[in-house]
Image: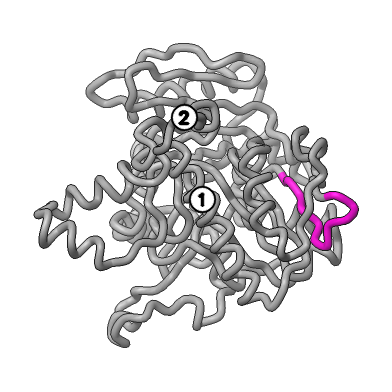
């Protein structure tokens, strides 16, 4: 009987899952089987898996998220029954570990209680991962579960990068910059070292561009600065999130326009970014097809790119230069037009693209004339979570 690690990556409207062979050494980068329930809270949820295109899935409208988890559990049980495998452990991507959790941890009721305390810091993601953990703790209490934290990779940040310019007692109460997308950046630190060696160990900036987006400045493959801070609202403009924002604008919205705290939260998390500005979509692929003749779409894309260029420039200053630029995640890996526009804004650094390589999303998209190599690297958060779990639990 083969031991497998099941990885769950739970978002607000989707759940990705992957099964890895825990007995293989080294742990294979490709899962044996994976899939996704998408559009959970929308009118037409879908389910897709390895070798099967996404198709409609019926979910209980009153409890769609619980129904999506149960659908995945059912499919996994069917798969286990056919294949002579067993689930030895479950790994979870958990966005926030706070100041307490700097390494992956096996979850029990006490740990779960701690993690629930961080829900206000990551309301788009934290509750959903914890719902899955709680359900499994209740239904399968003897099944080991491991939480792997998106904040953990950034514990190498120097203290000055963790500080917020508030009163000192706020720092002592735990208000600090944490950084996110850490599982993705941790995979980058491994994959880039394998592919590019000493070049990646220099001054590298990784752009994780998806529906959520951030940048990480690495030195010797460790995080030394990042664009996201106390919450996943900070830094870059995103699909529906605002990114860095003058706090005076929030005071104005609440004091003058009388928006409630709930209304402001909805605006910042769900009604801003590309969707809020364009009024069309949070997806750059859609916006690029409607850019011509639409001033709002043009403005949204222009600001989206400008903020990326601006934040990269800030991180270059912190690093004291740049030796490598890397794009990853859904937009970073697949959207040649956005990469081209960002790199055009970095021409002053000597960045130059190979147009054909960029159009093909090749591993290396910079031209021979570029002073700085520019790469596209596929991220693999699920593998990182499985890898940590096998190491922590000794699963084999």
Say above or below: 20 vs 375.
Answer: above
Pick the front one: 27 or 330: 330
Say whether residue 91 is visible: yes
Name, please, the residue furthest toward the front.
293
Identify the mark at residue 293; answer none if there is no mark. Answer: 2
Identify the mark at residue 355; answer none if there is no mark. Answer: none
Q: Residue 163 at what x, y percent from top left? A: 43, 79
Pick the front one: 145 or 387: 387
- Name the element at disc 2: loop
Q: Quadrant of residue 340?
A: top right
Q: Quadrant of residue 223?
A: bottom right
From the image, which quarter does the N terminus lie in?
top right
Q: Quadrant of residue 22?
A: top right
State which tag comes first along the sequence, 1 or 2.
1
Q: Residue 103 at what x, y percent from top left? A: 54, 64
State yes or no: residue 218 in magenta.
no
Say above or below: 99 vs 194.
Answer: below
* Location of mark 1 (residue): 213
Say whether residue 141 is visible: no
Q: Residue at x 59, y 74 (%)?
A: 156
Left or right of 140 on screen, residue 305: right
Q: Residue at x 77, y 33 (%)?
A: 360
Pick the front one: 121 or 321: 321
Q: Residue 374 at what x, y percent from top left? A: 77, 53
Say above or below: 60 vs 246.
Answer: above
Q: Residue at x 65, y 26 (%)?
A: 33
The label nearer to you, 1 versus 2, is 2
Q: Which residues are magenta?
A: 367-377
Q: Residue at x 44, y 39 (%)?
A: 10
| Number of other residues with Cα within 10 Å of mark 1, as a class: few under 14, some 14 to 19, many 20 or more | many
């Amino acid at each position: 009987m083969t031991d497998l690690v099941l990885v769950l990556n739970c978002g607000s409207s989707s759940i990705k899952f992957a099964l890895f062979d825990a007995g293989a050494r080294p742990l294979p980068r490709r899962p044996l089987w994976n899939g996704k329930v998408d559009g959970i809270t929308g009118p037409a949820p879908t389910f897709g898996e390895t070798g099967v295109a996404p198709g409609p899935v019926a979910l209980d409208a009153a409890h769609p998220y619980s129904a999506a988890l149960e659908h995945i559990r059912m499919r996994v049980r069917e798969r286990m029954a056919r294949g002579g495998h067993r689930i030895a452990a479950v790994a979870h991507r958990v966005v926030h570990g706070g100041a307490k959790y700097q390494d992956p941890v096996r979850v029990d009721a006490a740990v779960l209680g701690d993690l629930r305390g961080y829900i206000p810091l990551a309301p788009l993601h934290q509750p959903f991962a914890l719902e899955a953990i709680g359900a499994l703790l209740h239904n399968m209490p003897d099944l080991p579960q491991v939480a792997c934290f998106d904040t953990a990779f950034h514990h190498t940040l120097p203290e000055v990068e963790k500080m917020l310019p508030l009163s000192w007692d706020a720092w002592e109460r735990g208000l600090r910059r944490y950084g996110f997308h850490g599982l993705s950046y941790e995979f980058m630190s491994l994959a880039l070292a394998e592919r590019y060696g000493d070049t990646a160990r220099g001054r590298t900036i990784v752009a994780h561009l998806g529906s959520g987006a951030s940048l990480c400045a690495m030195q010797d493959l460790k995080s030394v600065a990042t664009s996201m801070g106390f919450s996943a609202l900070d830094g870059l403009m995103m699909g529906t999130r605002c990114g860095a924002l003058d706090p005076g604008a929030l005071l104005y919205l609440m004091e003058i326009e009388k928006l409630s705290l709930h209304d402001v939260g909805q605006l910042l998390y769900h009604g801003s970014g590309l969707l809020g500005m364009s009024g069309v979509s949070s997806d750059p692929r859609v916006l690029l097809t409607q850019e011509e003749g639409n001033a709002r779409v043009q403005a949204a894309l222009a600001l989206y790119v400008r903020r990326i260029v601006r934040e990269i420039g800030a991180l270059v200053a912190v690093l004291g230069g740049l030796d490598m630029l890397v794009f990853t995640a859904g937009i970073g890996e697949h959207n040649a037009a956005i990469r081209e526009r960002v790199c055009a804004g970095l021409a002053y650094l000597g960045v130059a693209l190979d147009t054909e390589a960029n159009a093909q999303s090749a591993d290396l998209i910079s031209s021979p004339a570029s002073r700085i190599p520019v790469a596209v690297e596929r991220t693999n958060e699920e593998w990182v979570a499985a890898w940590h779990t096998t190491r922590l639990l000794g699963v084999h």
